[in-house]
Amino acid sequence: MITVMGARGHVGNKIAHFLLDDGLPVRVLGRSARTLDDLAERGAEVQECDLLDTTRLAELLRECSALFAMVPSNPFTENYSAEQDRFGVSFTSAISVSKVPTVVTLSSLGADRLDAPGVIGALHRQEARLRALTGVRVTALRPVSFFENLLAAVDQLVQQGSHVDSIVSDLPIPMISTSDIAAAAADALVDPDWDGYAVRELLGERDVSYIEATTILGRHLGIADPRYVQLSYADMASVLTTIGFSLEYSHHYVDMTRAFNSGELTEPVPRTSANTTATSIESFAASLSVAGSPS
C-alpha cells in the first residue's frame, strides 16, 4: 500500500492517479473524504485524517510500503511559519513511529540553503527533519514555480486583460507542470534502486519569462492584448493582503520573488537532461478553458 498525503491538491491528486493507472494499491489522506471522491471511484482507499493528529497518522502509515508527504500550505493563516512547522513535526514523528520505509517529499529549489528565502524556509526546516530520520530512505523533490501558480493570473487576464506580480518582467525563470512533478514522485515511490537521502531538482521544460507566459496564456484564452505588470515588492505584498493572504505569508512570498529576481535561487542549478521535464507552458495553456479553469 502506498499512502499519498495532499491528495486533493494539484500534485498529490495526480500522483494518486498515476499510481492507480499502474494498478497499485493506494491510500489517500484528507480532512474530508468527500473531497477525494474522484480517487475513491477509481478504487483508492480514502481515509480522513488531521495531519496534526500524529497518533492517527502513524496508525495509517503502519504496513505502508511508501509515503508521499508534503506540508500543506495555507496562505491565509496568520502564523504561517509556525503552522508549517507544526505540520512538519507531526508527520515526521508519524513516519518515525510507523517505520514506513520509503518517503518522497515535495520541497523546493533553494531548500538546501540555510537562508532559504520566504516560504522556502519552512521547506528547508522540513528537509532537515526528514534527513535526521534513521532507517527511512527519503527522496526530496525540488521543483520550481508551478504553471498552476499562474491560474490566478489566468483569472486576472480574463477579468481585466492583465496580471501582476513582483517577478522581473523579462527574466526567464524555470517553470514546471505539476503533472511532471507528480510523475517524478510516482516513479520514486516505487523505485527500489536508491537508498539514504536523495534530492532531485526539477526545472521544467524551459525557462520562461512572465511576459512570455502572459502572451502564451492570453493567446490561448483569446485575449487580444494580454499585459504583465511588474509591481514593487511592497505593492505586491499589499495586493496579497488585500485578497486575504496573511501579512506573514505575503512578506514570505515577495522574499521568494526577490530571490528569483536576483538569480540566487536558480543560477547555482544548471539545466541538464536529468532535471528538464517534458510539459511545455504551451501545453499547459492549451488545457485551459476561456473561463480560466482546466477544461
Image (cartoon, helix red, strand yellow):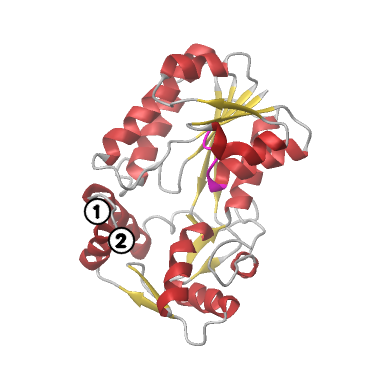
Is label 1 in a helix, a strand or a loop?
helix
Identify which residue, 137 or 230, lies in the foreground. 230
Name the disc covering residue 258, or none. Answer: 2
Residue 65 lies in what quarter of the image? Answer: top right
Which of discs 2 and 1 lies nearer the camera? The answer is 1
- Mark 2 or mark 1, which has the lower sequence index? 1
Q: Position of residue 55 (x, y in %)?
A: 44, 14
Name the disc covering residue 238, or none. Answer: none
Q: Which residue in the protein does label 1 denote? A: 251
Bin the neighbour count of mark 1 within 10 Å (Cα to Cα): few under 14, some 14-19, many 20 and up. many
Q: Is residue 240 left or right of residue 17?
A: left
Question: Among all residues in the image, which is located at the extreme front?
Answer: 34
Is label 2 in a helix, a strand or a loop?
helix
Residue 168 lies in what quarter of the image? Answer: bottom left
Q: Amino acid at mark 1?
A: His
Quarter of the image that includes the N terminus? top right
Residue at image point 47% right, 58% down: 149
Check the image and report above or below for 75 versus 236.
above
Check the image and report above or below for 165 versus 123.
below
Q: Is residue 4 left or right of residue 75?
A: right
Could one spot residue 7 in this view of the protein?
Answer: no
Kindly report the distance in space between the C-alpha atoms of the residues bearing marks 2 and 1: 11 Å
Could one spot residue 143 in this view of the protein?
Answer: yes
Q: Amino acid at mark 2?
A: Arg
Identify which residue, 154 or 165, lies in the foreground. 154
- Say if the magenta span includes residue 283: no
Give the magenta range: 5-10
Question: Among all residues in the image, which is located at the extreme bottom?
Answer: 224
Q: Main secondary structure of the magenta part?
A: loop
Q: Position of residue 9 (x, y in %)?
A: 53, 44
Q: Position of residue 173 (x, y in %)?
A: 47, 65
Q: Is residue 192 left or right of residue 288?
A: right
